[in-house]
Amino acid sequence: MEAVLSLPREVVVRSKVASIGILILDSNQTQRRLLAGALNRRPEFQVTTCDLEIEVALQLLASESISIVLVNTSRAGALDMSLLRRLHLARADVNTILLLDRYDRDLVLSAFRAGARGLFSFSDQPIRLLCKCIHCVHQGEVWANSEQLQHLLTSVAQVPSLRVVNSNGLKLLTLREEQVVALVADGLSNREIAGELRLSEHTIKKYVFRIFDKLGISSRVELVLYAVNHGGQLHAEWLPSRAVAAGKSN
């Protein structure tokens, strides 16, 4: 007791600041225990674990001092993305890291859109780097390998869509037509739109006239006004290459 009381005050304060509360969500009890055991060897980590039960996880986030959530699952499905979104909406200040055995482009984009701040892949990263990953994300950085970053950059560079609906909220246009509307709304000419989408100018003209016909309008000004009143910006989505797209448009 005397030894504790004799510690300098600033040492105790630094110890508290360095503490990182971690919640491990894993459906496999054995994996949970092994991962928790490995992380608990680090004095700065305070680890809590539970199954992949969102309601239990939300209760723990509300009652425990947690700043990092590790979601460990081999199932890269809709359930995981829904879980990530709910965690992010409930506690936007808590950073989530998704632990993966494998991944693809769609999973990478979906995970970051759902609020993940890091993707740690056991297939190409040794587990000893997980501690570094946790520290980086805790400091506000994003953890992703070069391939995952490339997927993100490619997505950002793609053309966004502008969804157009009728008075009943029903979607009126195809995804490619929505991309054309978004670029028309940005003030691009048919030639410039063709360059952006890597299609021929003739194909873009056909898209524009088809859009006019569907919406019952006759000018680009009317199209922009209609999009402003009935549209909403969407994430960029992948569409087929020039040859495939041009073939389908004919």
Image (cartoon, rainbow, N blue to C red):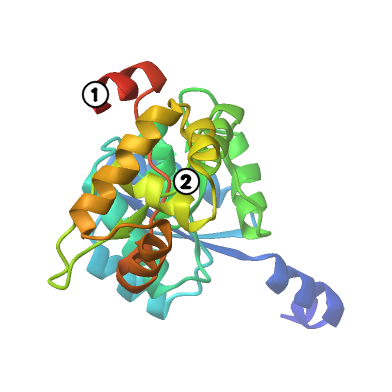
- Nearer to us of marks 1 and 2 is 1
Residue type, mark 1 in image: Asn
Of callouts 1 and 2, the N-terminal one:
2
Q: Nearer the viewer, residue 97 or 105?
A: 105
Residue name at image x 53 percent, y 71 percent: 93
x then y, percent, for residue 193: 49, 39
Q: Quadrant of residue 4?
A: bottom right
x then y, percent, for residue 54: 26, 63
Residue 69 as seen in the image, left or right of residue 106: right
x then y, percent, for residue 203: 36, 30
Residue 43 as seen in the image, left or right of residue 7: left
How crowded pointer 1 is (Cα within 10 Å; few <14, some 14-19, many 20+) is rated as few
Dot 2: element: helix
Q: Is residue 106 above or below residue 232?
A: above
Residue name at image x 52 percent, y 44 percent: 189
Quadrant in which the C terminus is drawn: top left
Give the residue number, with chain letter if any, for mark 2: 37
Q: Nearer the viewer, residue 160 or 27?
A: 160
x then y, percent, for residue 130: 57, 40
Dot 1: element: loop
Residue name at image x 53 percent, y 66 percent: 67
Give the residue number, with chain letter if any, for mark 1: 250
Residue 214 as seen in the image, left or right of residue 150: left
Callouts 1 and 2 close, C-beta under 8 Å: no
Q: Is residue 123 above or below residue 84?
A: above
Residue type, mark 2 in image: Gly
Q: Is residue 73 visible?
A: no
Residue name at image x 44 percent, y 75 percent: 64
Q: Is residue 186 visible?
A: yes
